[in-house]
């Protein structure tokens, strides 16, 4: 079970991601936020990391997991 999640969300008209309470952003597009979150997740020393996009309806989609060499838009 993966316990480390980079969560991408939209707040007002901008995108951001959070990890362990730290928020990074703003990003002007969802794709930019995904790319930045994947880059940051790839630098985490723990091997069990996911990047998840959460939409306004609180539906979550995993877009990257540790061990993948790339993700959407990379």
Image (cartoon, grey):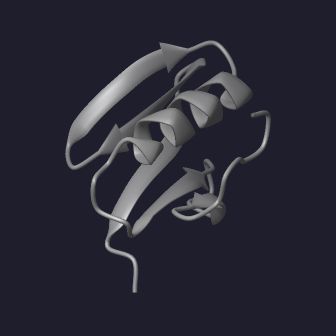
- At horizontal 69% and vertical 20% (from top left) the residue drawn is 29
Task: Determine the image quadrant of residue 60.
Answer: bottom right
- Residue 26's place in the image compared with 23, above or below, is above
Query: Relative to 42, is 10 on the left or the right?
Result: right
Of residues 17 and 40, which is closer to you in this image?
40
- Residue 19's place in the image compared with 37, above or below, is below
Q: Position of residue 9 (x, y in %)?
A: 52, 40
- At horizontal 32% and vertical 48% (from top left) the residue drawn is 44
Of residues 57 and 35, which is closer to you in this image?
35
- At horizontal 65% and vertical 23% (from top left) the residue drawn is 32
Of residues 55 and 43, which is closer to you in this image?
43
Tell me the quadrant of the picture where the N terminus can be found. Answer: bottom left
Q: Residue furthest right?
A: 73
Q: Position of residue 46 (x, y in %)?
A: 28, 62
- At horizontal 60% and vertical 17% (from top left) the residue drawn is 13
Q: Position of residue 2 (x, y in %)?
A: 39, 77
């Amino acid at each position: 079970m993966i316990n480390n999640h980079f969560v991408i969300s939209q707040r007002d008209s901008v995108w951001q991601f959070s990890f362990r309470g730290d928020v990074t952003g703003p990003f002007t597009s969802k794709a930019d936020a995904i790319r930045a979150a994947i880059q940051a997740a790839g630098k985490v020393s723990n091997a069990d990391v996911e990047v998840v996009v959460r939409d306004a309806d609180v539906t979550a989609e995993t877009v990257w997991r540790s061990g993948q060499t790339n993700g959407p838009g990379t």
